[in-house]
Amino acid sequence: MLGDLSARPALLLVRAAHPRQAAATAVALASAAAVAGRPLREVGLVAATVLVGQCLLGWADDLTDRRSDERHRPTKPLARGVLDPGTVWFALTCAVLLVVPLAVAHGRRAAAAYLSLLAVSAVGDRLLHGRVLSFVPWVVSFALYPAFLAYGGWNGVGATTPPTPAVVALAAALGLGVHVLLALPGLVADHEAGERSLPMVLALRLGTPRLLLLAGLFTAAVVVGILISGRTVGLT
């Protein structure tokens, strides 16, 4: 008997890594690298680096919120007690040891940008998750993605010019929109936990349906702006 495959530690680890968000971010950044004209091996390196980094952030998030999730999000593997915290810590440590050389493979400037955005995301989420300034780590980390792509190259052979201010500003705006959209499904649990993040404050004032519509339109407009800017101004 194979038993319940969903209860296996490897699959539980995948669930705790926020796999949909991790995969979507990796695909989006790899696609941006491809559109920017990067060769296939560099596109693959971007995808691998971002995927590992996002898994790292997902595990760190679930470890940080484990006690709160036990009360308000009991379906998560750590909150249910079906995944041992030590296993997640081990996976997190391995991810850190892996993401550093992956980032360095892009070059020193690109590595500095990517490792900085990981640090901002992890520390900012821990300190500001339930506060009105919850958007800050999202805006800052997304603003660093263009630098990661602009400076990156195989063995560090990439562009030496910084990304254009327009692309950086649009990436920061995208971070704001993504933050609000990703927070919407968990607003009920966040409200029960007494959190007052920016999406929570906006939802209480505007109503969740209206906020969903506005955030969706805002994010779509920013994506269109990024596409136009990429075609006209370029990344660097």
Image: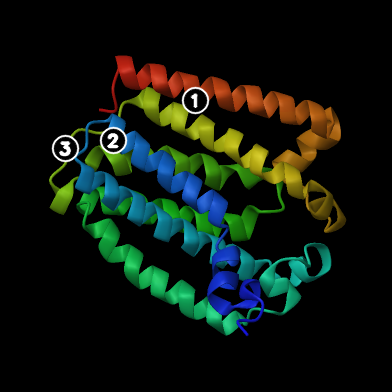
The residue indicated by pointer 2 is 34
235, 220: nearer the viewer:
220
- Quarter of the image that includes the C terminus: top left
Number of numbered tags placed on the structure image: 3
Q: CA distance from mark 3 to mark 2?
A: 18 Å
Q: CA distance from mark 2 to mark 1?
A: 16 Å
Relative side of 146 to 131, left or right: left
Relative side of 189 to 164, left or right: right
Label 2 or label 1, whichever lies nearer to me, is: 2
165, 11: nearer the viewer:
11
Residue type, label 3: Thr
Where residue 126 sits, quadrant-wise, is bottom right
138 relative to 195, above or below: above
The residue indicated by pointer 3 is 160
93, 116: nearer the viewer:
93
Residue type, label 2: Ala
Mark 3: few/some/many CA within 10 Å (<14, 14-19, 20+): few
Sooner in the amino-acid sequence: mark 3 or mark 1? 3
Numbered label attached to residue 223: 1
Mark 1: few/some/many CA within 10 Å (<14, 14-19, 20+): some
Label 3 or label 2, whichever lies nearer to me, is: 2
Marks 3/1 in contact by CB < 8 Å: the verdict is no
Q: Residue at x 52, y 24 (%)?
A: 222
Residue type, label 1: Val
Marks 2/1 in contact by CB < 8 Å: the verdict is no
Q: Would residue 55 be visible to someone looking at this image?
A: yes
Sooner in the amino-acid sequence: mark 2 or mark 1? 2
Q: CA distance from mark 3 to mark 1?
A: 25 Å
